[in-house]
Amino acid sequence: MPAISASAPGKIILFGEHAVVYSRPAIAVPVLQVKAKTTIVADPLAPPHSVLIDAPVIGLSSSLKDLDPDHPIRFVIQQVMQALDIVELPSVRIRLTSTIPLAAGLGSSSASSVSLARALSTFLGHPLSDESINRIAFESEKIHHGHPSGIDNTVTTYARPIFFIKNQPIEWLEVGLPMIFVISDTGQSSHTVSVVADVRRNWTAAPEKYEAWFDDIGQYAFQAKQAVKTGQLDEIGRLMTRNHELLQELDVSSPELDQLVETAICAGALGAKLSGGGRGGNSIALAQSIDQAQVIAESLKSAGAVSTLITTVPMSER
């Protein structure tokens, strides 16, 4: 049997991180230049039901049975088996690779779960629907992030821009003009689960203050939805910068992220903000053109970014 492979892209959040956990809207888009990939190949010479897993990006080489019961990879595999009513797997080798930086707010964990669930169900002859893949990836995100909103797994499953509100039907986001973003990595890991927990703890201690901030962030997402639809790039940039200022109020930014945001704006970006959990990871900046994006990227590297990536969100097909 030939090898079966499946992949899923990275993602960036344009508006609404953290507030989205509290049922405010958020906007996110796929980053197609980076991806997680799972390849599965039959291993007929191995003992019966031998499942070997190789995930070099996290330094993992193990048999399935030796993984902790709550390990995300084992969890996804078991969820696929349960969905297909399969008790035992054939002997296989599973290899997970990724070009998505880890702990950087680019959706590496959800993309890995999506690619694994999609590859395994296809290998077993019963490809699961996107809806089922999305559900499995969301449950896996709970292991990684504690109280996920569901936005990461949704974008990486469907690979489309979305306007997202927790526990509401998915709304595809119409893009009126191409958007060019410069993603810059601080080089510091963003531990989403701990940042989300800190925000929850602070929200519990001062709910009125935090609810007001969440409301403002949600309003920016609503305004940005219309600006994205009509191609108002200047307005999108302005709202991004205002969103970042509120994320600073939530205490989820960092001096390094603030420096990259300021540098991008000084280099001509229409707007900039952190993207993802914060306190590390990536910032994003909106550029008017590819040429300007390259200038912004060079400025960000000079300001301390360990890497940059230019990505374009294409205009929606009419």
Image: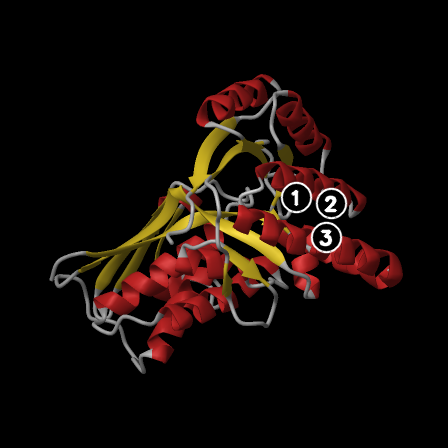
Q: Residue at x 61, y 65 (%)?
A: 165
Q: Tell me the distance, in whole angstroms, between the alpha carbons under discs 2 and 3.
A: 9 Å
Mark 3, Cα crowd under 10 Å, few <14 / some 14-19 / many 20+, is many
What is the three-letter code of the residue carrying label 1? Gly
Question: Which residue shows up at 30% across the image and 80% down it?
Answer: 87
Disc 3 target residue: 217
Please give the residue where the numbered disc 2 appears in the rendered image. 247
Q: Residue at x 51, y 23 (%)?
A: 292
CB contact under 8 Å: marks 2 and 1: yes
Regarding residue 17, the answer to whether it shows in the image is no
Which amino acid lies under the numbered mark 2 shown in the image of this protein? Answer: Leu
Q: How is the image coloured?
A: secondary structure
* Badge 3 element: helix
Q: What's under tag 3, amino acid-wise? A: Ile
Residue position for label 1? 278
Q: Quadrant of residue 203?
A: bottom right
On screen, residue 176 versus residue 270, left or right, reads left
Q: CA distance from mark 2 to mark 1?
A: 8 Å
Q: Position of residue 196 (x, y in %)?
A: 69, 55
> From mark 3 to mark 1, how far is it between C-alphas?
15 Å
**In contact (CB < 8 Å): disc 2 and disc 3:** yes
Secondary element at tag 2: helix
